[in-house]
Amino acid sequence: MQSLEALARDARALANGDVVPALPLTGAESEVARQLQICNACRYCEGFCAVFPAMTRRLEFPKADIHFLANLCHNCGACLHACQYAPPHEFAVNIPKAMAQVRGQTYVDYAWPPALGTLYQRNGLTLALASAAGLALFLVLAVALHGQGLAALWSTPVGGFYGIFPHNLLVGLFAPVFLFTTLALGLGVRRFWRDVTPATSGAPLSAPATAEATNAVLRLKYLDGGHGDGCHNEDDAYTLARRRCHHLTFYGFVLCFAATSVATLYHYLLGQPAPYDLPSIPKLLGAAGGVSLLLGTAGLWRLNLRRHPEHGDAAQKPMDRGFIALLFLTAASGLALWAARGTAALPLLLCVHLGAVMALFATLPYGKFAHGIFRTAALLRHAVEKRQPNPVGLGAD
Ligand code: SF4
Ligand code: SF4
């Protein structure tokens, strides 16, 4: 059976003389399609998240629709714990796992350049820590060779950390990494958007849809389980811990980024170079962001270790943990740097911190961060699609 929208698409294509063959599904995509056919008959989970209302607008699940739905899911586990057809039932419905496997595949499919996406998927934690260690070592060698050997690594620098790495050198190191990350994420999400837009009504963004999706992203609305008591982690109990740790991590990252942006304005517009101390705005933002990031990532790490084995895709755990570890290392080394100001430990700590920040930004497009970007795009498309007439007319939005 085909949805009316899909039939109309095919009819238009035939009328124009373009026959668009359906793209073949991968094994993971076929499994999502199989499970969603069961869910579409059951519909018990309609109120849990955005995935199920979006599912009820479809009677079949081509590739782009599956990519859209997989990125709309955020692996809260609610539908697994509620499902009467979950393993060991012969239907073996495990939506969080099936969706996570397709999501992992989309991170690789849409990654730019593609080879890096595959690399990070397989070795996430090792690659993240090895990059941070390698870059920190590179900076340690630079300090040792430029100063008076190893003694330069344990000495109080004149002029703070710009006495160790001049400002222009830091800009020269970080600007290309930041631009590369922005380009890679931008190209990836543009391809995703182009693929899923025709599958989600094709209608353009509107102000109400954008406002609704932004609200859902900023509040992490769907991590409340659909009823406000939270989602699941290691068992059937509801918990808000995942939502709170995600909030601490997300807003911690935003505050740290804001601290760096304000510090750049201080430097170039006000002629006030770093370091800054309390109660300056960059320091207030950075200190609050660093503590929030530290608490959030420590909580996420603990939750990740205890996570129910049937939630999500076990093969992606190294990637998830690599991202959490780099965020934690960035926050911890940043706060340690502040505590060590004016001491001989500053050069070594600065190398560790800069190595962690650089590795974090270089790997952002290929890990869990990409989930946040693709999910935001999927929520935007969902908010647009739900405002269009339901092509099936059987479900309630
Ligand atoms: S996950 Fe299970 S309970 Fe929920 S809609 Fe699908 S089949 Fe029904
Ligand atoms: S795991 Fe959560 S977000 Fe994903 S489909 Fe199930 S209820 Fe929705």
Image (cartoon, rainbow, N blue to C red):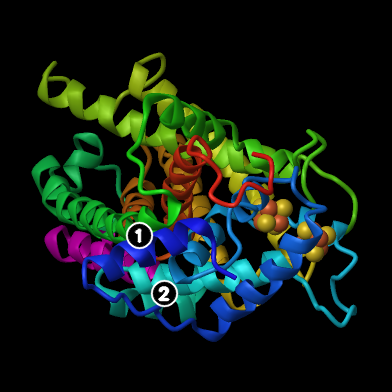
Location of residue 261 (image quadrant): top left
Q: Position of residue 11 (x, y in %)?
A: 36, 65
Q: Is mark 1 within 8 Å of ligand 2?
A: no
In this rendering, the count of numbered labels is: 2
Residue 110 left/right relative to 290: left
> Which of pointers 1 and 2 lies earlier in the amino acid sequence?
2
Instruction: Kindly report the secondary structure that dominates the magenta region of the rendered protein.
Output: helix
Q: Nearer the viewer, residue 61 or 117?
A: 61
Give the numbered dot on residue 192: 1
- Check disc 2 and report the residue beneath it: 120
Residue 267 seen: yes
Q: Quadrant of the C terminus?
A: top right
- Name the image quarter holding residue 133: bottom left
> Residue 197's x, y, as percent?
36, 53
Residue shown at 82% from the left, 53% from the top: 44
Q: Residues within 10 Å of mark 1 (few under 14, many from 20)?
A: many
Q: Position of residue 286 (x, y in %)?
A: 42, 30
In this rendering, does residue 313 appear at all? no
Crowding near pointer 2: few (<14 within 10 Å), some, many (20+)? Answer: many
Towards the viewer: 18 or 294? 18
**Magenta segment includes 139:** yes
Residue beneath the point at 55% across and 53% down = 72
Q: Which amino acid does the dot numbered 2 rest on?
A: Tyr
The residues colored magenta run 130-151
